[in-house]
Amino acid sequence: MPSLNITFTDDELEAVRAAAAAEGKSLKQFVHDLPLREQQRLQFVRYAISWGEQHRGEFDDAFPDEMPPADRRQGAEAA
């Protein structure tokens, strides 16, 4: 199975060890899971942005005093 050798400073390695311990994981499992979690986070953010864009009009209609409507320019852009 492929593997990686990753170089950390002493301080970085101590921080990674502390983060792994806080999650109750071994250092190896914690480092293995990091890129997978980042991939899931990015997928979630992309979906959330898409969902927000699709529902922006509904928000503007439901809460007209909360924020300017999405199609209205703001600040220096309006000038």
Image (cartoon, rainbow, N blue to C red):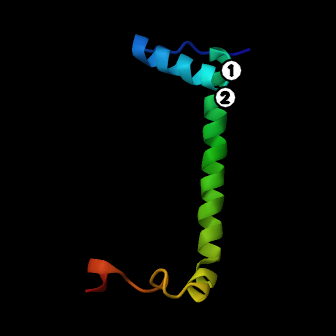
Residue positioned 69% across, 16% down in the render: 2
Callouts 1 and 2 close, C-beta under 8 Å? yes
Q: CA distance from mark 1 to mark 2?
A: 10 Å
Sequence order check: which comes first, mark 1 or mark 2? 1
Closer-to-camera residue (46/13): 13
Q: Where 39 sits versus 71, above or below?
A: above
Rate crowding at label 1 as few (under 14), some (14 to 19) or many (20 or more) other CA atoms within 10 Å: some
User: Residue 35: x percent and y percent?
Assistant: 61, 33
Residue 19 visible (yes or no): yes
Which of discs 1 and 2 lies nearer the camera? The answer is 1
Residue type at mark 1 is Lys
User: Residue 40: x percent and y percent?
Assistant: 67, 44
Q: Where 24 sits versus 48, above or below?
A: above
- Which residue lies most toward the right here? 1
On screen, residue 15 versus residue 38, left or right, reads: left
Q: Where 29 sits versus 78, above or below?
A: above
On screen, residue 74 versus residue 6, left or right, reads: left
**Residue pointed to by mark 1:** 25
| Quarter of the image where one finds residue 25 | top right
User: Residue 46: x percent and y percent?
Assistant: 61, 57
Rate crowding at label 2 as few (under 14), some (14 to 19) or many (20 or more) other CA atoms within 10 Å: few
Which numbered circle lies on residue 33? 2
Residue positioned 44% across, 84% down in the render: 68
Residue type at mark 2 is Asp
